[in-house]
Amino acid sequence: MTGFSQAVRAVGRPVHASTSSWWRRALRHRAVDATALVTGRRIMVLAPHPDDETLGCGAVIARARAAGDQVTVVIATDGRHSSRSQVLAPEPLARVRSGELRTACRALGVAEQNVVQLGREDGTLSDCLPEVAAELAALLADRRPDTVFVTCRQDSHPDHEALHEALSLALRYPVPAQEPPQVLAYPIWAWTSGPWFLAAGRLRTRRLTWALRQLFTTGWVEIPAGDHLGAKRAAIEAYASQTTNFTGEASWSYLPADAVSLFLQPSEIFLAVARPEPVR
Ligand SMILES: [Zn+2]
């Protein structure tokens, strides 16, 4: 690395941190209250990996359950590849994450029979979109949710983006006499890496354009966490493999406390997605 590029990176990091924070604040400022979309309604939360449901929608889930509303949590993959380890192989890691998911959902008030694990291998969702879409369509027909939460299409992770795509496909399945649900997309990695979306030191200009455009759109909504932030915090703490150095290895990846804190705010934020037209 040259001295010049070192200098650019040294300046770039604080610039990225401060503009990210400004971008998030600007989106929060524009977001309108959407509590009505989760009040007295059937809710389905779709997550690519165990922990995304809690980080993105934990307070919404706890709020709905405290009100006695139906919540179904659907986890698409087993999360077995979240970290490289010499100590914990992928399959045992998948079992750890499944246990953490059950504990987290209990903390949020979701009964075990309402937690559905599709069990796809972490990192493979885009290879099986039609199959996942068919599974989601069957769940939508069975649970008939009024509001569906899913990861945002620009979330900078292949599984997160693929799950959004799978839901779009699932909503095109014809379901007689059923009103299509309202879809709210939640950012996880987009929230932490926007608006610059730097990857290996390179700007991802299409993502940057999307992020800047969001400052002028009206689709962002927020739902206050209210008294349910404590339940969300407890659910996040259940994910020790994702929020601590679980094995003590230098190679273990986990969300640092400052990233976790972005999801422990007074409200959760979502992008309202237009209802896709059913295929006729
Ligand atoms: Zn994820």
Image (cartoon, rainbow, N blue to C red):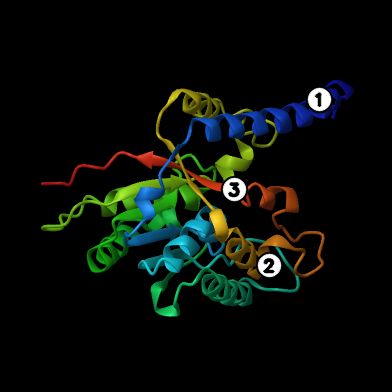
Task: Specify whether residue 26 is in view.
Answer: yes
Closest to the camera, between mark 1 and mark 3, is 3
Q: Is residue 142 left or right of residue 260?
A: left
According to the picture, the residue beneath numbered tag 1 turns out to be: 11
Mark 2 vs mark 1, CA separation in Å? 32 Å
Residue type indicated by callout 2? Ser
Q: Residue at x 81, y 65 (%)?
A: 249
Q: Residue at x 15, y 58 (%)?
A: 175
Looking at the rendering, in which quadrant would you find the N terminus?
A: top right
Which numbered dot is residue 159? Answer: none
Residue type indicated by callout 1? Val
Choose top left, top right, bottom left or bottom right for residue 6.
top right
According to the picture, the residue beneath numbered tag 3 turns out to be: 266
Instruction: Point out residue 176 in the picture as x, y percentages from the top left corner.
Output: 11, 58
Mark 3 vs mark 2, CA separation in Å? 25 Å
According to the picture, the residue beneath numbered tag 2 turns out to be: 241
Instruction: Point out residue 107 in the picture as x, y percentages from the top left corner.
Output: 56, 72
Mark 1 vs mark 3, CA separation in Å? 31 Å
Query: Quick one: label 3, few (<14), some, or many (20+) residues within 10 Å?
Result: some
Label 3: which secondary element: loop
Instruction: Point out residue 210 in the picture as x, y percentages from the top left corner.
Output: 48, 28
Mark closest to the chain's N terminus, 3 or 2: 2
